[in-house]
Image (cartoon, rainbow, N blue to C red):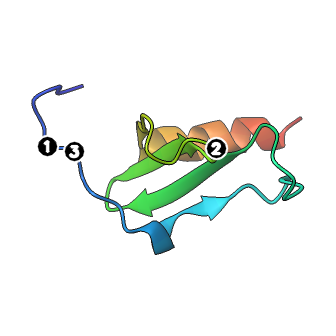
Amino acid sequence: MNVEAPVQTVPEAAWFKSSYSSGEGGECVEVAACPGTIHVRDSKDKAGPTLLVASEGWTAFVEFAAQG
């Protein structure tokens, strides 16, 4: 991880909320795909910190999570 790399600004329209969200609040995340990285944030704190995950790592995580 390079902490000196500039943070990429993600347009608001690029964010997608989890399909498991009820729309009534609660625990939910949003993700945005950018070239080479996936950005993850708390949907209740859009100005808060964003987690950046390499595309390959995100793919591995989603495949593992889908196994149940």
Spatial CA distance of label 3 from label 1 is: 4 Å
Element marked by disc 1: loop
Local crowd size for mark 2, using a 10 Å CA cut-off: few (<14), some (14–19), many (≥20): few
* Residue 6, numbered label: 1
The amino acid pointed to by label 2 is Lys
Query: Mark 1 and mark 2 in contact (Cβ < 8 Å)?
Result: no
Residue at point 51%, 48% (across, down): 46
Q: Residues within 10 Å of mark 1 (few under 14, many from 20)?
A: few
Q: Which residue is at 32% across, 62% downward?
A: 35
Q: Position of residue 38 (x, y in %)?
A: 45, 50
Circles 3 and 1: CB distance less than 8 Å? yes
SS label for mark 2: loop
Report the residue marked by disc 2: 44
**Which label's residue is closer to the chain start, 2 or 1?**
1
Circle 3: element type: loop
Q: Which image quadrant for residue 12?
A: bottom left
| Neighbour tally class for label 3: few under 14, some 14-19, many 20 plus, Cα within 10 Å | few
Report the front residue among 24 and 2. Answer: 24
Please report the residue visible at 52 percent of the width from the left and 44 percent of the height from the top: 40
In the displayed orientation, state which residue is furthest to the bottom: 13
Q: Position of 62 compared to 1: left or right?
A: right
Q: Which residue is mark 3?
A: 7
